[in-house]
Amino acid sequence: MAKPLKLARGRCGVMAAGAGQVKGWCPGALRPMLSGDGLVLRVRPHAGRLTADQAQALADLAQRYGNGLIDLGSRAHLQLRGVTEAVLPALHQALQELGLLDPDPESEARRNILTTPLWRADDPTLDLVAGLETALARAPALPAKFGFAVDTAAAAAVLGGASGDIRIERAENGLILRAEGTRLGQPVTLEDAIPEAMRLLAWFLAQGAATRMARLLAQGVAPPLNATTPPLTAPALCLGPVATGLCLALPFGQMQAETLAALAVAPLRLTPWRSVVLEGVTDFPDLPGVIRDPDAALLRVEACTGAPGCTSAEAATRDLARSLTQDLADELPRLQGAGCQLHVSGCSKGCAHPGPARLTLTARAGRFDLIENGPANGTALYRGLTQPDLIAVLRGRLAQPN
Ligand code: SF4
């Protein structure tokens, strides 16, 4: 089994690496990140799917080797928290036996593939994901966070709002290959989709220092695609019954191992919206903490780990976010349909919601800066707010037209 890299200590996304620093890296199972509550191990299930046995085993591992907390992430992955270095070899061995460990950290980093949670056995999705995994195993190193989306379920492409630099998508009459940052894609077949995706990747890498496809194309560079066809798009999944099962969410995408064990009554498909589809299930499980209501105010609030779980945090976040959600319950649901309305971030990195939110509170030295319609590192409208100030200020801003 491959040995893990030297452990990284530092804030999420910045790993000390010898004399310098590697910015923007993503933790993995083989490259765990040291956080305030121990090591964080990211597990990337193939095609975003865990069998019921894998999910049950991961719940056991989270309790045996971690602190029992499990995060759902925006790359349709999950994270075990509170792991110690001493148990890493045993945990890696267990993940390998479950088919959830890559051969080395470099392969793990390249296998950054989002898969539609609406795939069915008779559509091309699983074949495309397998082909992409094989091709990426031989690919050169990719920029941090560079990823792929296979969004080819028969009904429509639903991952449009989720991160993916190279996308294979469902179109009206077949499949297309699309570069993020463009509206149209090139028609492809099941046979040539992966070779064409690798050709697009090679072109991207040949452009030099660009880190993400959309940023490169925003400079006016055109991808080498005969792009004629739009994807057949549909909105992100709502909570409740979906074509392949039942979609449910957990507050801030975090659960205890016992919850994962209780959900392991069927295969689980992880989504980039930090929700889970229980394959073939029609009724919500009777579990505390599970969010069933697609209009729940908590679904419009994001909060990162914050203090004390993250060493970079300048304040606690989730308890504050819960209490603000309760206090603003009347205001927040009225703004539904526009994505994240309130983002509470423990520092300016904004891990829980990298993009803009209607309102963002960014912790700074125990107080909060308020950013409107911007990301956690955006320009603050108010600085240094104390917690007693927050409700009145947030109410005032939510009463304003967006
Ligand atoms: S955004 Fe939150 S989780 Fe990310 S580094 Fe800052 S405090 Fe930590």
Image (cartoon, helix red, strand yellow):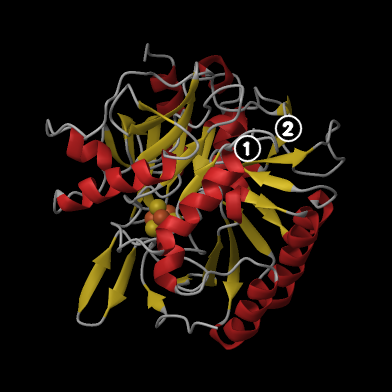
Closest to the observer, 188 or 108: 188
**Point 53% across, 69% down: residue:** 102
Which three-letter amino acid code belongs to the residue tagged 1? Pro
SS state under label 2: loop
Which three-letter amino acid code belongs to the residue tagged 2? Thr
The residue beneath circle 2 is: 244
Left/right of residue 75 with respect to residue 289 in the rendered view? left
The residue beneath circle 1 is: 117
**Can residue 28 be seen?**
yes
| Vertical relation: 128 (above or below) 306 | above
Labelled pair 1, 2 in contact (Cβ < 8 Å): yes
| Vertical relation: 197 (above or below) 52 | above
| Vertical relation: 297 (above or below) 400 | below
How many numbered marks does the figure carry? 2
**Where residue 243 sits: x, y (%)?**
72, 26
Crowding near the residue tagged with mark 1, few <14, some 14–19, many ≥20 C-alpha atoms within 10 Å = many
**Point 77% across, 53% down: residue:** 259
Crowding near the residue tagged with mark 2, few <14, some 14–19, many ≥20 C-alpha atoms within 10 Å = some
Quadrant of the drawing holding the C terminus: top left
SS state under label 1: loop
Where is residue 164, by image quadrant?
Answer: top left
